[in-house]
Amino acid sequence: MDILDALVARLRAVIAAFGAPPIAAPAVMAAPVRAKPAALAPGSVFTPTRPRSGRRNLVGREPELARILDAILLDGGHVVLYSERGRGKTSLSNMAIEALRRQGAVVGRFACEAQTNFDMMIRGLMRDLPGSLLSGAHDSEGCEAVLPAKELRPADVAAIPQHLACSRLVFVIDEFDRLQDPDTRTTLADTIKLLSDRGIALSLLVVGVSATLEQIIGQHPSIERNIRAIHLPLLPDGDIAAMLRKGGAQAGIFFPEIAVDTVVQVARGMPYMAQLMGLRMTQAAAQRGDDEITAADVADAVQLLLRDTNPSVIGSYSALVGADPDQAVKSALEAVANADQDEWGRMRVIASDDGVSVGGRAIPVGVWTLLRESGVLTSLDGDTRFVQWGGRPLMYYVQLLAVKRQRQVQNVLF
């Protein structure tokens, strides 16, 4: 014990004389440098010619998505999703399919063609389902094998879930407006009624271009209580702006206010046109090797879109304004192209002794008559309190011409 005490005392003396050996501080690990995500090509960010998929690629549509999911998952019902072309119905249905699958639903999808009939539609939907839903002799043949060989009827569709190993089955029928056979529409309506009356765990999501519910499914009032009709509205201006900024960020290109405002002005709530203009602007910036849209890119995009306008649209515009030396028609077209509209693209009409007010813009009586008789402005279902554009391409052309003139004036002044 004395020896041990002596060694401890000696060690303390050495430390006191020379100081404790320095203790090396642990090396501070540098935080890993997160690589900046690679910019995506403009054509993979802005996709006007094809629908989007993936929730992160879409902006807005949360209320409509919630209504679809509630109708199918909570109510076990059926949905008809419709609107004019270009509002993003297929992109929304893509989003709904992903959400349904995350909730455990099995989804089959079929896109109609002009000659599609009921039998072709149901068999196509069954071919889209995974064969793993079957057990026994049919599992290698695909789900279509459970269907009878005869021409299919609504009762055959009602029997499908009992052959499949799933708790919730959803059939998505896209491009339904392309169908030319009225009997197919009637048979599908009968199928919806049968599925609803029997409480069968099979829901339909029908998607198509239409201005009204009756135009897409026909006159079948007996099934109105069995479906959730969702008329897809235009996107709010704020969502159009967010779409551009989000896409620009993915492409590594900044959208200044001049570019955003121009797209919002021309698109008027239509996702297709916003996507197309965003694509042309980002392509112009990327071609220059710049990471910000400039006024020149905006002008180039507008010029390209004017060049690519359908000749029939250009001809219609020329016929309308060509015989009007006072340019009253041209001014009226620009006024209506910027008039106040509701979420469906309708503009309120108010008549007075001096003329007509459309969406808050005054139109002379003679010009108003011309725009109505030529089909530029139309009323839906005879409701003359509102009008809408008979064809949006003409509205886009009018807007693009106005933007081009605005840019030219700004170049001269500044």
Image (cartoon, rainbow, N blue to C red):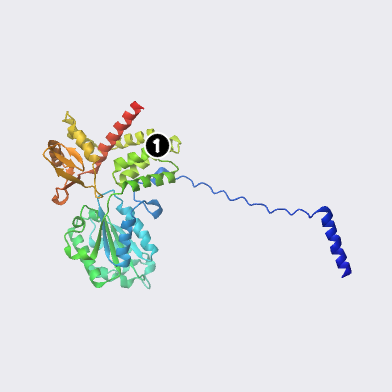
Q: Is residue 73 left or right of residue 177?
A: right
- Secondary structure of the residue carrying tag 1 is helix
Residue 54, visible in the rendered structure: no
Q: Position of residue 306 (x, y in %)?
A: 29, 35
- Relative to 193, is 22 above or below? above
Q: Position of residue 247 (x, y in %)?
A: 40, 46
Which residue appears at 34% of the width and 40% of the height? 261
35, 369: nearer the viewer: 369
Q: Position of residue 174 (x, y in %)?
A: 28, 56
Q: Is residue 29 left or right of residue 319?
A: right
Image quadrant in which you'd find residue 113: bottom left
Which residue appears at 21% of the width and 42% of the height? 360
Image quadrant in which you'd find residue 410: top left
Which residue appears at 20% of the width and 60% of the height? 185
Q: Amino acid at mark 1?
A: Ala
Circle 1 crowding by C-alpha within 10 Å: few under 14, some 14–19, many from 20: many
Which residue appears at 39% of the width and 63% of the height? 102
Q: Quadrant of the N terminus?
A: bottom right
